[in-house]
Amino acid sequence: MENTYTVKDILKISIPIMIEDVLRTLVGTVNTFTLSRVSDSASAAVGVTNQILNVVLLISVMISAGAGIIENQILGAGKERESSRIMMNSLSLAGVLGILSSTLTVVFAKEFVAFMGLAEELRSDGETYLRIVGLSCVFQFLGTMLSTHFRSHNSSLTPTIIVVLSNVINFVGSTLVLNEKAGNLTGVRGIALMRLISEITGTVILLILFSRQKWGQQLRDLFSIDTGMTGRILTVGIMASMERVCFIIAQMLTTRFITDLPIEVLSAKVYVQTLSEYPNQFGVSIGRAAQILSGHSIGAGKLDEAHKLIRKAYFTALCFDIPGCILCRLFANQLVGLFTQSQEIIEIAKLLLTIDIITGAARSLNHSFSFGLKSAGYVLKPMIINFFSIWMINVGLGYLCTITLGMGIVGLWIGQSTEEWFRGLMNCIQWERKVWQKDAGKLSHENR
């Protein structure tokens, strides 16, 4: 069968996604950088608090993943009316769950921060940041879903431009706070409010632009909920996102392994995770682009084409993941030096970034084959494998190395790297054995 999609097609979609994801990550980086000018303690407190927000925002990742997988296949099958109903129903779902998440985050901010095991002197900053930024959850839920719909219609550039605007607002606002030119807005409270304003502005503009697209949207579909379709979105989304859900929760729990260590260790972890997120986002954007194209091919019944496409995505991701990690390590002094002048923190970070190079090679497997399996709707078995992999290796081995063997934060990184390799190889094996084609063929038939 003729192979329609090429690496060029993957890059055409992935580059706007890459820019958008990097800029979204930059919002947190700007906050971390700005607060590091105040103190390493404030930066560490907010860095740990952001992990709580990441867990809450996983709900939006779930529903947008489910909507995206189904929508891509239906678009590939040429059923535009059905696609428009999914768009509007998923926005309603995102709005309701977003309001609920914002409410819970604000109300239980103190309990969430206490659960993370932060030292008493760090909790006040953590609670303040979580309560304010937690209000933005509903806007981030809607923004994530809207971006998914734009990407499914090969309009990745629009959400990218909006994220650029949000970053400008956040950066300018944070700079004003840092230089005490934002009135009474100072410190953690001021930085959090600027992030909230940037998130609200971006989502409102994205919603206006979405309303002007001619994709068959009908306002009545926001209130005429198809419970069967909603259930399908949630089912596929939960199973497809379980890997990320478990990983983020594991990250939050394993942070507790080191909260009793010196503040320099916790700060190094926050700074390294902030930096390593960038090369990781490069690979993720390639996987997400390949998932969209693969979903279209599967929806059209072109399973062999989808198989070849994901292989190409793997080699493309490899060209970004490893060099990105190497560059972070080579320029560790300069990059970590942006956040702190502590030589002890810099030395710890350099060691962790060295281990990240090995981990980066494994991420390419997950940045391609994992997304391929999701595009086919083959999510149950991978979900089970990923669940046990993350909890037994990432958390279990991480605890053994960090606490039992006394290796500290290095042990935590060894556990993460080992788990990434195991999970990546398992995803690769499942894709290459083509065990997903039966489910993909069934979905393709249903969508047509």
Image: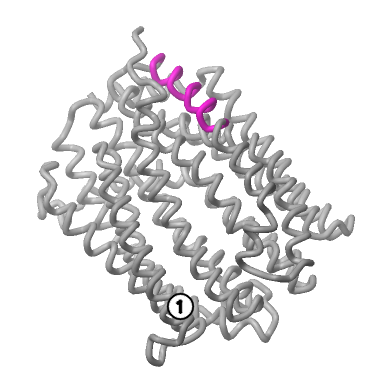
Image quadrant in which you'd find residue 323: top right
Is residue 335 at least partly visible in the picture?
yes
Q: Is residue 305 magenta?
A: yes
**Which residue is drawn at the image coordinates 25% and 41% (left, top)?**
155
Q: Is residue 201 left or right of residue 320?
A: left
Residue 343, image x, y percentages? 77, 67
Residue 201, image x, y percentages? 27, 68
Residue extending farthest to the right is 405
The crowding category of the residue bearing disc 1, from other C-alpha atoms within 10 Å (few below 14, some 14 to 19, many at least 20), is many
Residue designated by label 1: 191
Question: Which image quarter holds the C terminus?
Answer: top left
Q: Is residue 415 magenta?
A: no
Residue 362, image x, y percentages? 64, 35
Q: How many marks?
A: 1
Q: Is residue 326 left or right of residue 66?
A: right
Q: Is residue 425 above or below residue 49?
A: above
Q: Is residue 400 above or below residue 35?
A: above
Main SS of the magenta part reads helix
What range of the chain is rendered magenta? Answer: 304-318
Q: Nearer the viewer, residue 183 or 331?
A: 331
**Which residue is drawn at the image coordinates 61% and 65% (left, top)?**
338
Q: Secondary structure at mark 1?
A: helix
